Every structure is written in structure tokens, then in C-alpha cells.
């Protein structure tokens, strides 16, 4: 399995990219999508933000109070900016439509680098399973990229609209943006919804699962959903006690360097610390206690890695 691949990016450059999981979560059970128009707008916002921030969407799912996207990005910074742009752009949509301001302040976004084959496969399988949160069948759910995967049919062009050919007024009405979309290959169906096969990098997901549809379905169906929810959603957002944080740090040490945290050289500890600081809710005092590095030195390390 190749986690790092070369891709033609939205800005026209060719870069090596890696997989990230992005989540937009209503922290206080905020209902972000109240009708089909909201769901449709959210999907389109994901695509527009991906173009703006130069990342590629692998698969996505939008449900009533949160969304997930698997993306390919050349840097953590681009992935972070993509997540923040979704929040900003959907906040504008929500405020304008419902005349409610400040709702999205209760929403949190995270972009997490998927640093192992196991993590990639389970994250990409977990995303479409979120249709179950809306009480829907994964196969039939319209607001995810699930049906773009392992489809042996070419993306249908007959009876569809090409987004790049929309007139200015149509683009604003349908895509909710004034951005230049002349270079995109996105397609709309008869109801002006984006066709998943035209917006998702299904090739990447399929190679992650060894181009085996049954392997993909088995992973989706047999997944430990609470475990993935903890790893992708809850763990990055909750402050942990030192002993629990230590267990997570140990897990990453074994995964990244095949050795325990106690045996890590200082150089390797310095490589791991910024990742945990970005992806978990922690503090410099806690990092100092767990990694045995002084607080001032930790502050310098994190400052240099920003």
C-alpha cells in the first residue's frame, strides 16, 4: 500500500501528498444541516474549500451535526487550513440562511495525519459509516462519497451539467461561490447535486484496499466504530489524564519508531512532540512530564515547528 502518492493538485502543480482525516464537529450537538439544501451546500463547500486550499478529496460524509472528509494534502498546514475554511464558509451559509450568528463558534475542526496503513484503511472506511448517524443505509445515503468507490461504471456525462461551464449567475446559485471553477471536472446530476464520482479520488481509496471491493466492504461492515470515533474525534478534543496521554504517546512511539517511549532518543521525541501537540488536546506542562523535556525547551521546539 502506498500512503504517499504523486498527484496533480487543484492549483496545477504536481506534488507528493499524504492522507489526512478532517472532522467538523458540533461540540454541543448543534444541528448544522436542517434540510436537504443544507446537506447539498455542505458537500459543495467541501469541494470549493478543497480547491481553495489545494487539497484533494478522497471520500466524505455529511450528517446532521458534523462532517468527515478523507483528503490528500502535501502539508499539515494545508490540511488545517482546509478544515478551517470549511467552518468559515459554512458559517457564512448558515448565518445568511437562518439569520443566526455565532452558531459555528460551537463547532470544532481537526485535521489529523493518518500515519499508518491500519489508520488509513480504518479512517477511510469509518467516514461513510457515519450515514448510520442519520439512520440511513450506507449504500443509499446521498451525502457521502461512498458510491464513488469501486464503481466500474464511468461517471455519467449524459444528462449532467459540467460545473466548469456554469454561467456566473448559475455558479453562484448552484455552487454558492464566485470562485473560478473553470478548471474543475465536477459534474452535477439532474437535481444539481454534485456527482461523487466526479469529485472524489476513488483511485487512491481503491489502492488502499488493494483494489479489492470485498476487502473494502469487509472493513466498512466489520469496523470497531467506537474505537475509531475515539481515535479520530474524541481523543483529539478531550484533555487526558497523564497516564492516558502516556498510553497514547506509547502507541505512537511503537507505531512510528517500533520501540517504547522510554527507549526513544531525544531527536525522535522532538519529532513526535509537535504531532501530538497538533492532534491532541494537551499542554506544555503535560508534554514536559510525559517526555521528560523542560517546558522552555518544549516551547522553543513547538515554536520552531509552527
Image (cartoon, rainbow, N blue to C red):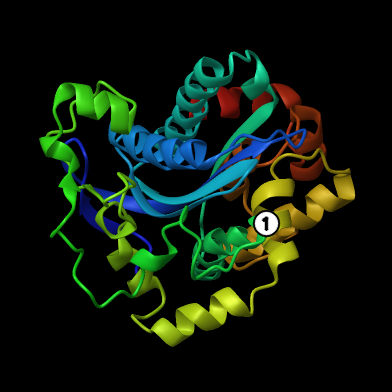
Q: State which quadrant residue 55 falls in.
A: top left
Q: Is residue 98 above or below residue 216?
A: above
Question: 164 and 203: which one is in front?
Answer: 164
Looking at the image, which residue is at 51% across and 61% down? 141
Q: Is residue 141 left or right of residue 171?
A: right
180 displayed left or right of 174: left
Q: How many marks?
A: 1
**Residue 183 can be seen, yes or no:** no
Residue occupying the point 84% across, 43% down: 240
Q: Is residue 281 left or right of residue 138?
A: right
Q: Is residue 80 left or right of residue 226?
A: left
Residue neighbourhood size for the residue with mark 1, other residues' Cα within 10 Å, grouped as few (<14), some (14–19), many (≥20): few
Q: Return the x and y of residue 97 as percentages of the image width and height.
A: 52, 20
> Is residue 97 something one can see in this rendering?
yes
Q: Position of residue 1 (x, y in %)?
A: 37, 74
Q: Position of residue 281 (x, y in %)?
A: 73, 36
- Residue 215: give x, y in percent of width and height: 47, 84
Tell me the residue that label 1 is attached to. Answer: 133
Q: Is residue 180 above or below residue 234?
A: above
In the structure shown, which secondary structural element does the residue marked by tag 1 occupy? Answer: helix
Q: Quadrant of residue 94?
A: top right
Vertical side of 3 occupied by 292: above or below = above
**Which residue corresponds to the image point at 58% horizontal and 28% vertical from the top-left?**
302
- Name the residue at 26% across, 51% down: 190
Amino acid at each position: 500500500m502506498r500512503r504517499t502518492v504523486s498527484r496533480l493538485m487543484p492549483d496545477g502543480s504536481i506534488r507528493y501528498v499524504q492522507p489526512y482525516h478532517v472532522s467538523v464537529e458540533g461540540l454541543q450537538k448543534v444541528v448544522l444541516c436542517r434540510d436537504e439544501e443544507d446537506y447539498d451546500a455542505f458537500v459543495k463547500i467541501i469541494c470549493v474549500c478543497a480547491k481553495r486550499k489545494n487539497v484533494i478529496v478522497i471520500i466524505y460524509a455529511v450528517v446532521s451535526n458534523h462532517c468527515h472528509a478523507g483528503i490528500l494534502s502535501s502539508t499539515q498546514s494545508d490540511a488545517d487550513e482546509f478544515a478551517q475554511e470549511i467552518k468559515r464558509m459554512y458559517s457564512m451559509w448558515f448565518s445568511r440562511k437562518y439569520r443566526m450568528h455565532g452558531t459555528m463558534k460551537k463547532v470544532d475542526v481537526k485535521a489529523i495525519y493518518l500515519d499508518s496503513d491500519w489508520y488509513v484503511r480504518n479512517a477511510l472506511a469509518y467516514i461513510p459509516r457515519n450515514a448510520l448517524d442519520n439512520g440511513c443505509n450506507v449504500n443509499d445515503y446521498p451525502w457521502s462519497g461512498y458510491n464513488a468507490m469501486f464503481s466500474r461504471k464511468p461517471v455519467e456525462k449524459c444528462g449532467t451539467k459540467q460545473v466548469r461551464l456554469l454561467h456566473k449567475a448559475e455558479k453562484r446559485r448552484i455552487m454558492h461561490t464566485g470562485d473560478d471553477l473553470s478548471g474543475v471536472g465536477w459534474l452535477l446530476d439532474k437535481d444539481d447535486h454534485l456527482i461523487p464520482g466526479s469529485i472524489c479520488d476513488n483511485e487512491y481509496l481503491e489502492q488502499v484496499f488493494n483494489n479489492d471491493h470485498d476487502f473494502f466492504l469487509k472493513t466498512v461492515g466489520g469496523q470497531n466504530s467506537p474505537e475509531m470515533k475515539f481515535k479520530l474525534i474524541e481523543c483529539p478534543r478531550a484533555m487526558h489524564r497523564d497516564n492516558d496521554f502516556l498510553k497514547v504517546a506509547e502507541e505512537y512511539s511503537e507505531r512510528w519508531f517500533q520501540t517504547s517511549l522510554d527507549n526513544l532518543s531525544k531527536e525522535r521525541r522532538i519529532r513526535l512532540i509537535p504531532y501530538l501537540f497538533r492532534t491532541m488536546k494537551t499542554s506544555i506542562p503535560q508534554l514536559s512530564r510525559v517526555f521528560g523535556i523542560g517546558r522552555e525547551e518544549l516551547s522553543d521546539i513547538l515554536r520552531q515547528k509552527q
